[in-house]
Amino acid sequence: MAHTQTKTHSLELDSTRLADDPLILVIPGLANSGPDHWQTKWEAQIPDCERVELGMWDDPHRNTWVNKINLAVHRAGRPVILVAHSLGCHAVAWWAEYEQPAYGNPVVGALLVAPPDVERAGVDQRLARFAPAPRRALPFPSFLAASENDHYCSLRAARGLASDWGATFAYAGSIGHINAESGIDDWAFGQLLLAQLLREHRTRQGVGREAETETRRRAAARYTRLPWIQSAEGGSQAEL
């Protein structure tokens, strides 16, 4: 998605390193992500953050979505972090299942948010097209963030997916399907998880300790003022 305005990087990355940081590919779910969705806000705020135009938003076809992700990943020509929401998470899992890329290459991380339970009885048939969910561990570091009161997936089922996919489970509170209706604006907790993926990638690439410490300090100053982030750091709201 093209944006004409200058972006302010909410993750406070050093602009001199942007060329070395991964491209962030946003992968929405069913019906796409509208203007009030945190994914759309991230595209406007974060440099090198692009949406994968999967098409067929209201009538998805699994293999078409997988092929669109594959094309976007290979066109990037650089490391990639995937940020998927809802059914987009299953598209990512199926992409990894079909492509079986080397670990951490070209995808160096993924943030998987509110994946639906595509196997439960009575599920929307458009979601059921992505069943059964792949059970193979994903070939890249990842977080799976889920909400306690998401009507598309129980917390238990979300934990099961995280276990199957080898993802670190992150408890996001009780905020529904973690979408525009959740009232989370640009979702600061999700940005914290994305920042962690970026930090881990830089560490693997040998970024200097001093630069990493400064990035961590600035991120902490931004996020720890939020009460629910403080609670997460205490262990009651997140498992990182």
Image (spheres, rainbow, N blue to C red):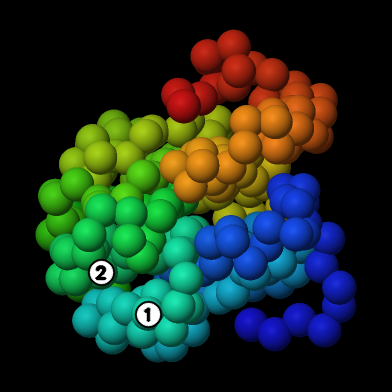
Alpha-carbon distance for marks 1 and 2? 12 Å
The total of numbered circles placed on residues is: 2
The residue located at (46%, 64%) in the rendering is 80
Front in this rendered view, residue 209 or 199: 209
Residue 85, image x, y percentages: 46, 59
Q: Mark 1 — residue?
A: 74
- In the rendered image, the residue lying farthest to the top is 234
Res. 95 mark: 2
Residue 121 in sight in this render: no
Front in this rendered view, residue 146 or 77: 77
Q: Is residue 58 above or below residue 124?
A: below
Mark sitting earlier along the chain (1/2): 1
Q: Residues within 10 Å of mark 1 (few under 14, many from 20)?
A: few
Residue 25, image x, y percentages: 51, 68
Horizontal side, residue 15 vs residue 181: left or right:
right
The residue located at (45%, 78%) in the rendering is 77
Q: Is residue 19 above or below residue 205?
A: below
